[in-house]
Amino acid sequence: MKLQKLLDANKDWAESIIGGDPHFFQRLANQQTPEYLWIGCSDSRVPANQITGLAPGEVFVHRNVANIVQETDFNVLAVLQYAVDVLKVKHIIVCGHYGCGGVRAALENTRHGLIDNWLAGIRSLHRRHLDELSNMPVDAAVDRLCELNVTAQALHVARTTILEDAWERGQKISVHSWIYRLDNGRIKPLAEPITQACGLTIDS
Ligand code: CO
């Protein structure tokens, strides 16, 4: 049975951690104090902890298709509010990835089902940048839209009442725009981190 492999691997993993640090799990069970919130794509090839070398307890994670931050999505807002107000994370990392299937679907002029509604925001981002994107080969346009999507979603994070209120209180939080390359495993920062309320000064 394939699933037994997973359970066996889990047992080995837990034992190897305890081998190096006997109180590791007891310590974590009492409290989590992550400094980072990761907002990434659900894509199985972009696991937050593994690609950043972070251990359990070090990063709070939210993932959805195409790392979208919608102001009407209670799921992401609940994660954001808990991370900022309770966990008091110092860094929020919005990390997209090149070759994102969600972004590609948003760029295509065909129906994919319910997901097209989820991707509506990226479709309008595509329309806003049509001058640049329509002159590129499709794969390059997908990758460029992946980048534009990351910076747009980071801006959405910064414009939530959660971040604006935190900055107003003097809480130190930075919002980062990162992108991951599937074919070499490397992350690239795309823009300067946002460290204060940006009001109407920048747009996607
Ligand atoms: Co993706």
Image (cartoon, rainbow, N blue to C red):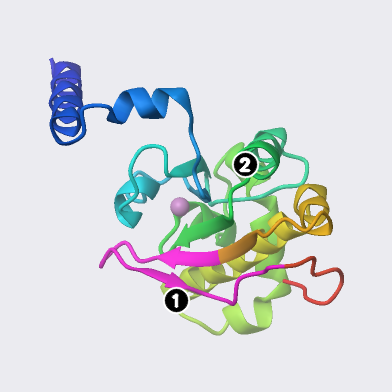
Kindly identify which numbered label has been placed on residue 140. 1
Question: How far is disc 2 from disc 1 in space, using C-alphas?
Answer: 34 Å
Asked if one can make out residue 47 in the rendered structure from this viewpoint, the answer is: no
Residue annotated with mark 2: 83
Q: Quadrant of residue 164?
A: bottom right
Asked whether the residues under the numbered discs 2 and 1 touch, taking CB atoms below 8 Å apart as contact, a structural biologist would say no
**Which of 31 and 10 lies nearest the eye of the viewer?**
31
**Could you say whether the residue bearing mark 2 is in a helix, strand or loop?**
helix
Residue at 67%, 83% in the rendered image: 131
Residue 162 image position (x, y, % from top left): 77, 47
Q: Earlier in the sequence, mark 2 or mark 1?
A: 2
Classify 10 Å Cα crowding around label 2: few (below 14), some (14-19), many (20 and above): many
Q: Is residue 161 or residue 98 the one in the foreground?
A: 161
Relative to 67, residue 64 above or below: above
Tell me which secondary structure the magenta stretch mostly adopts: loop
Query: Is 125 or 35 nearer to us in this picture?
Result: 35
Q: Is mark 2 within 8 Å of ligand 1?
A: no
Q: Quadrant of the N terminus?
A: top left
Q: Amino acid at mark 2?
A: Ala
Identify the image quadrant of residue 129: bottom right
Q: Which residues are magenta?
A: 177-195
Residue 178 in the image, given as x and y percentages of width and height: 49, 66
